[in-house]
Amino acid sequence: MYMTKLRAALPIGLAFCMAMLAVDRAAAQLTPPPAKPPDGAVLFKQQCALCHTTNVSDPPRQGPTLFNIVGREAGTSGGFRYSPGFADAKFKWDEQKLDTWLVDPQAMIPGAIMPYKQAKPELRMAIVSYLKELH
């Protein structure tokens, strides 16, 4: 009697093990869902808002307001005292200039006082896209 039960249980046990192995292999082959693109407003709040505002009614902080930055002449935000390097900055901010700025501000404008740098292109793009919306 015992052997009969054992013989009946053996195929069931083997089938269970095979099923678990198949599930494990299938799980290993699944690809994760694509990552959500970074949210520019959230990134700005986390990484930029300590020094910059996005509202002209707020007084400047460590840096000037970034409201309407795209298309603005560099170094011209009212009520903010820029570092001397901005006197020679004769350009308007656009997406490319902002991206370059976020990579290394001091390389773009020597003497600029901005410690933040962002090496990740996807994060810079999200922040610049957000700034572009502010007008």
Image (cartoon, rainbow, N blue to C red):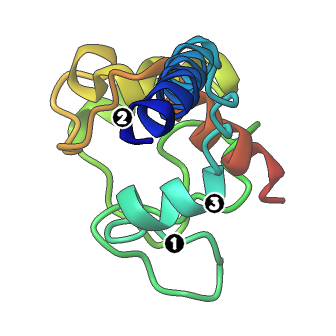
Give the spatial CA distance, label 3 vs label 2. 26 Å
The reply to whether residue 90 is in sight is no
**Is residue 39 shown above or below 45?**
above
Q: Earlier in the sequence, mark 3 or mark 2?
A: 3
Q: Which mark is residue 101?
A: none
Q: Earlier in the sequence, mark 2 or mark 1?
A: 1
Q: Nearer the viewer, mark 3 or mark 1?
A: 3
Give the spatial CA distance, label 2 vs label 1. 19 Å
Q: Earlier in the sequence, mark 3 or mark 1?
A: 3
Image quadrant containing the N terminus: top left
User: Between residues 55 and 3, which one lies in front from this camera angle?
Assistant: 3
* Residue 121, horizontal then vertical, whole percent: 50, 19
**Is residue 16 shown above or below 58?**
above
Quickly name the residue at label 3: 41
Kind of residue at badge 3:
Ala
| In this picture, residue 64 sits left or right of residue 122 | left
* Residue 58, horizontal then vertical, whole percent: 54, 87
Q: Residue at x 27, y 33 (%)?
A: 117
Q: Residue at x 30, y 23 (%)?
A: 109
Estimate how packed mark 2 is, as few (under 14), some (14 to 19) or many (20 or more) residues with alpha carbons within 10 Å: some
Quickly name the residue at label 1: 53
Kind of residue at badge 2:
Phe
| In this picture, residue 103 sits left or right of residue 16 | left
Q: Nearer the viewer, mark 3 or mark 2?
A: 3
Kind of residue at badge 1:
Thr
Extreme residue in the front direction? 1
* Residue 48, horizontal then vertical, whole percent: 40, 58
Tag 2 near tag 1, CB within 8 Å: no
Q: Element at badge 1?
A: loop
Quickly name the residue at label 2: 86
Q: Element at badge 2?
A: helix
Estimate how packed mark 3 is, as few (under 14), some (14 to 19) or many (20 or more) residues with alpha carbons within 10 Å: some
